[in-house]
Image (cartoon, grey):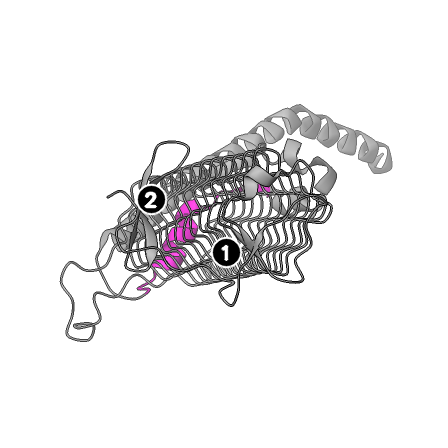
Amino acid sequence: MAGDERPGFWLRWHNRVKAIEPWGILLAVVALVMSVATFWIDYSDRVQEREVRAWQLLTTKAPGNSGKIAALEYLNSEDGLICWPWLIEQLDWAYDELQDLPMCLVTLKQQSSLRGIDLSPLPDPTPETEGDGPAGVYLDRVNLNGADLLYANLQDARLVHADLQGADLSRTNLRGANLMHANLMGADLDLVDFSGAFLKYTNLQSTSLYKANLRNAILTGANLQGAHLRGAFLNRADLQQANLQSANLMGATLLDSRLLHANLQGAKLGDSKLEGATLFHADLSGADLQYSVLSNSDLGYADLSGAILNRARLLGADLSEAKLQDANLDRTFMWRARLLGADLRGASLVGANLQDSVLVDADMRGANLRAADLRRTRLGSADLSTAINLTQEQLIGACKSADTLLPAGISVRDCGESLEEDQPPEGTRVYDREGNAWQWRDGEWKKGW
């Protein structure tokens, strides 16, 4: 009898368990929801508390690092559940399409804006820095990739090896900042103040630097390939060995800048101001220099092959040993320019003004000299044997040496011992084709009276 009751006993328990099973599942779900809600509230409180502490740390003026790197990186970060930034970086073929997607499936912390943050030095120099000026904030190797730093004040900051790729630094104050070896590729730097900044070997490839202030900045070896520098101010900037290939410098001001051995292949420099600039051994092949001002500049040994220089102003410029093969120099103003040993083979000099210029040892074979003004030029040892559209009237007052080669039927007087030009009297005044006044003062041509 007991054996017959045992199956019935287990059946009754099975039915009871089955009856309460939905309630158990419901309780488990409720417990899970409460746990998630508790975690969310707790995590949100901790995020808010940490953000408050980070902002307090950043707004407290203190020399050096003082924990600011960690605070900045935390505020600029995004956190959540099931994040895949590393996966997006790996998928090169779809990076552009995926980079705008949320970094996490469930976002727990949004990236904070750092717009207008003030990390400038202490207002008064401390005893340790007195005499050297106030020390800026120390942010070496900080990762602020994609940060929003619009209107930020980072004057005198040290950002060596910093990662600022894709960051928005437009209108930011970075006067005197040290960004050596920093990565700013693709950053927005419109109207930024980089005056006196140290940007040696900095990566500024494909950046936007519209009307940026780079006066007296050190950009030796910097990578500015494809950068947009339209209307930028680079007076007295040091750009030695900088890579400016295909950069847009239209309307930029580079007075007295140093561009020795700089790469400016295919760069756009139309209407730019390069008076007194040093471009010794610079590569300007294929560059666009229409309407640019290069008066008193040093272009010795520069490569200007295939460059477009029509209507450019090169008054008193030094183009000794420069490569100008197939260059467009139509209507260029080159009064008293030095072209010793210059290679002008196949160049177009239609309507160019070369009065009083020195063309000693210049190679002008195949050059188009139609309507060019070569009065009083010095042509010692120059080769014009196959120059085209050259007439006797264009060479009034010009002189040559015994080994000068001229087209058949054209002759000029011998220069004698004086092959190079004599300096004009102090105060000599001339006008270029655009009506701008120039005056010889203190051994060079200066604009205005």
Q: Quadrant of the C terminus?
A: top left
- Of 48 and 189, the residue lying toward us: 189
Q: Quadrant of residue 45?
A: top left
Label 1 crowd bin: few (<14), some (14–19), many (20+), radius 10 Å: many
Task: Please tell me whether residue 352 belongs to the stretch shown in magenta.
Answer: no
From the image, tell me which residue sits under label 1.
338
Say which element carries label 2.
loop
Determine whether 13 is above or below 421 in the image: above
Residue drawn at x 33%, y 44% as measured from the top left: 172
Image x and y of residue 406, in percent: 68, 50
Residue type, mark 2 in image: Thr
**From the viewer's perspective, is 3 left or right of 223?**
right
- Of 290 and 333, the residue lying toward us: 333
Residue type, mark 1 in image: Arg
Image x and y of residue 383, in percent: 68, 54
Residue 35 shows up from this direction: no
- Circles 2 and 1, Cβ within 8 Å, touching? The answer is no
Residue drawn at x 57%, y 31% as measured from the top left: 29
Residue 431 shows up from this direction: yes
Say which element carries label 1.
loop
Alpha carbons under labels 2 and 1: distance apart: 42 Å
- Which residues fall within the magenta stretch? 65-82
Q: Quadrant of residue 273?
A: top left
Task: Please tell me whether residue 79 belongs to the stretch shown in magenta.
Answer: yes
From the image, tell me which residue sits under label 2.
172
Label 2 crowd bin: few (<14), some (14–19), many (20+), radius 10 Å: many
Determine whether 411 is above or below 219 in the image: above
- Of 366 and 222, the residue lying toward us: 366
Mark 2 or mark 1, which has the lower sequence index?
2
